Amino acid sequence: MPIIRLSKLNQAMDGTFDRCSVLVELDNKQLVQLTEALIDPADLTEDGIETDPHVTVLYGLLEDDPFAVSGLIKDNWKQQIEIEFGKTMIFEADDYDVVVIEIISDDLQQLHELIRDNLPNELTHPDYQPHLTLAYVKSGVGTKYDDLGLDIISKRVIVDQVVFSSTEGDFTEIPLIN
């Protein structure tokens, strides 16, 4: 399994992460361009537009070991993941709103459950709501971006790998099909 360095997601000031995670990385410049066209720059917070589009499969793994995840997948998972993009939604936080695209995927839900049920974790959000973060906007302005249809992007994506993100910011690609 190659270890690759990507832009760091959800990292602390010292470049580390609180927990390990598994995610689906979407290398899609079109999503970033769409977000730049969709979101008024005056509405953005300091975190701004998400430049590394991804869908988190599970955040909160306690073992900093990509081989535990890859072994579990190798032994129990034998298919690609189909992801369908839904409408935009808003997650409200205390100091900002998060503009996201809902993700519809039975495959993703099943992979989340496989990892959650078989590897030690502390979930920060017990109800899994797969989504793709587009941008962080000022508190209260997110509602104007809620429930937008995004006909510009492809509605479905097929992925054949996930990425393990360590607490040190290393990213390891894990194939879904051997």
Image (tube, rainbow, N blue to C red):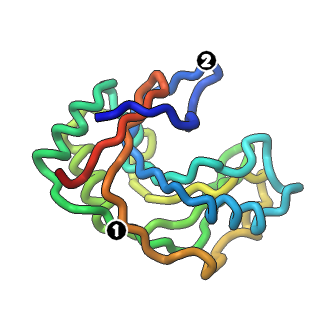
Asked whether the viewer can see residue 122, the reply is no
Instruction: Tell which residue pokes out farthest to the front in this image.
Output: 2
Q: Report the Cα–Cα distance between label 2 and label 1.
A: 35 Å
Asked whether the viewer can see residue 58, the reply is yes
Q: Is residue 8 above or below residue 63?
A: below
Q: Position of residue 32 (x, y in %)?
A: 66, 58
Q: How many marks?
A: 2
Q: What amino acid does circle 1 point to?
A: Glu
* Mark 2, residue position: 14
Residue drawn at point x = 79 percent, y = 41 percent:
46
Residue 126 relative to residue 88: left or right: left
Q: Position of residue 10 (x, y in %)?
A: 56, 35
**Foreground pick, 89 / 77:** 77
Residue 133 relative to residue 106: left or right: right
Q: Provide the secondary structure element on which disc 1 rests.
A: strand
* Mark 1, residue position: 82
Q: Residues within 10 Å of mark 1 (few under 14, many from 20)?
A: some
Instruction: Tell which residue pokes out farthest to the left in this image.
Output: 75
Q: Position of residue 161 (x, y in %)?
A: 32, 51
Q: Quadrant of residue 87?
A: bottom right
Q: What amino acid does circle 2 point to?
A: Asp
Residue drawn at point x = 84 percent, y = 62 percent:
40
Residue drawn at point x = 46 percent, y = 54 percent:
55
